[in-house]
Amino acid sequence: MSTHSPSPSPEHPILAGMAAALNPPDDTSPLPVGTLIGGDVVEGVLGSGGFATVYRVRSPSGYVSALKLLPLDQGPERAERAWREMSLGMRLRHPNLVRQLGAGHWPLENPRYLWVKLELVEGPTLDEWGMAPGRTLGDVMDRALEVARALAVSHEAGVIHRDVKEANILVGQSTGQAVLVDFGVGYHPAYPTLTKGMFPPGTPAYRAPEAWAFGRAHAGEPGAHYRAGPGDDLYAVGVVLYRLLTGRFPFRPAEHGGENVEAVLHREPLPPHLVNPRVPLAVEAVCLRLLAKTPEARYPDAVALYEVLEELRARTDVDWKQVLHPERRRPVKRWSRGLAAVGVGLAVALGAWWLGSGREVAPGGHTPEPVRAVAAPPVETPPPPAAAPPLALRKDSVPVKQQQTSGPQSEATSKRRGATVRTACLGLTGAALQACLGTQQVPSERSPPPPQECPAGAVETMTNTLGLRIRERRSMDWSDVRGRSVHVHEDTPLRVAGAWEAGADYSGKGYKIALPDETWLFGRLYVKDGRVYGRFTEARTPLGVRYPMCLELLDTDGNVGLELQPGSGPGKMMVDPVVEVRVVDRFK
């Protein structure tokens, strides 16, 4: 007869807990709510990983904490790892380090697990926190200060974390401070190494160059393993800071996936201010020093890093209130485009009346209410390259008759009107976009542009930061309404519909996202001999990050330029809604 107790009803969690205490489940099954461990009651699962499951537990007094349950019967390495984490945690006491509250075996008879009770830090991981709209430069640097402080205390106690990354840094909801957690793969010289392979457990994207160099130098050598030091933790902080500032890793992945070790060893990361112009050079200098190729070139220790960050944060010549990743309202959703199409006529009509009345909007003032109701947020048009692509009409077209104006005031008024109408149209698609753009006019005839170099840093950004390849192609659109031509202006932005995956055009599959969904491409269009040509020189992501680009416009057959569609005429460009762009290293 089986000695297992019958499964209690789920309506009785305490009875279920008593049964679980008598008969622990296998290592793959979560403990039921109500299980009693170390005097605390399990309330649910917080997470699980390769070595442990973490539960939310409550003490008889009502104190809520996290309890990590580590199996002891899966080999000596796991048992040693469990004891190591418990012992390392007992050495560390600091507000920016997760607190260990107790430890023990479970069940008491024939124990199969080691439990470690930890302070429950409720809040998002650092990357989730950092990408939330409205995070300022000062906010990010405060969190970096707290991580440096945590590592200073840890290193002083002789403990190397070895897996510093955003997922192991939580931002407490109650305190707002960063807390470094999970010392499960930490190292202290008093404990024997658990490394069986070349590298200690950790995350490759945060691995320091000296570790990769050791791996290359000792490849195939029996028993060779790399021992991490404080410099490895500091390098990982550099990766974390780079991601918070730019939204990207310092190096793109290798061609066939995995880490680009060659880049980590021998190439410098793209300076953060080129990826995100809102990053000050003083902050960038700290980040790049942390990412230096040797530990000697980084900061001497975490204390020195903290002091540098503290001194930097005290500077008054840095705009600490600068929002790093401004929130960008998404374009009008498909279900609301019918309403947008109805309202856009009124918006454009009232907007035209507003402009025609000769009134000016003061800098920083509100957009007139009818326009603002259907417009995407105002976006500055990027300055054109040295030789901005002008626009030329077909040779057989008739010049548009224009009202005579004179003086700089009339020219400025005309530019303001065009910019305001184009701003109102940004983000609209389909019929709404056509109705809105129908009020715009193509500029007067100009000569076609000469060959032109790419914007400064564009090729490096596209190939290194974004992982794109020269001559790589990608489908884009001006509208998701197929079978209907779209009326475009010379600076109408182009939309990246669906994420652009780096290398997808060559390998048959994408590796990582180069540009996210709803990124907009800005540049210039012009007409020559019945075709519309385009040069796009900047990309803006939904988070507001800007990248210099060098992309030329193609039709869906891969031909340079687009054929003008029926309905085109003097001052009016009608084109297909779906097009392609190609990555180039020079505009010919």
Image (cartoon, grey):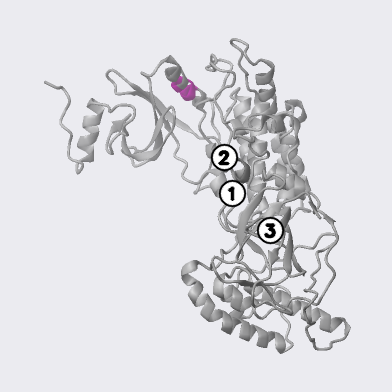
**Which disc is residue 130 wearing?**
1
| Residue 493 can be seen, yes or no | yes
User: Label 2: how many residues lie within 10 Å, few (<14), some (14-19) or many (20+)?
Assistant: many
In the rendered view of the protein, which quadrant contains the N terminus?
top left
For label 1, the SS is helix
Residue flagged by tag 2: what amino acid is it? Glu
* Residue underneath mark 2: 166
Q: Tell me if residue 283 can be seen.
A: no
Q: Which residue is drawn at the image coordinates 66% and 42% (left, top)?
A: 241
Farthest top residue in view = 222
Q: Quadrant of residue 180?
A: top right
Residue 399: where, in percent of width, then height? 80, 82
Circle 3 is placed at which residue position? 554
Q: Please, what secondary structure does the residue beneath circle 2 have?
A: helix
Amino acid at the residue labelled 1: Gly
Q: CA distance from mark 3 to mark 1?
A: 37 Å
Q: Earlier in the sequence, mark 2 or mark 1?
A: 1
Q: Which portion, as a residue range, is magenta?
A: 82-87
Q: Mark 2 or 3, which is nearer the eye?
A: 3
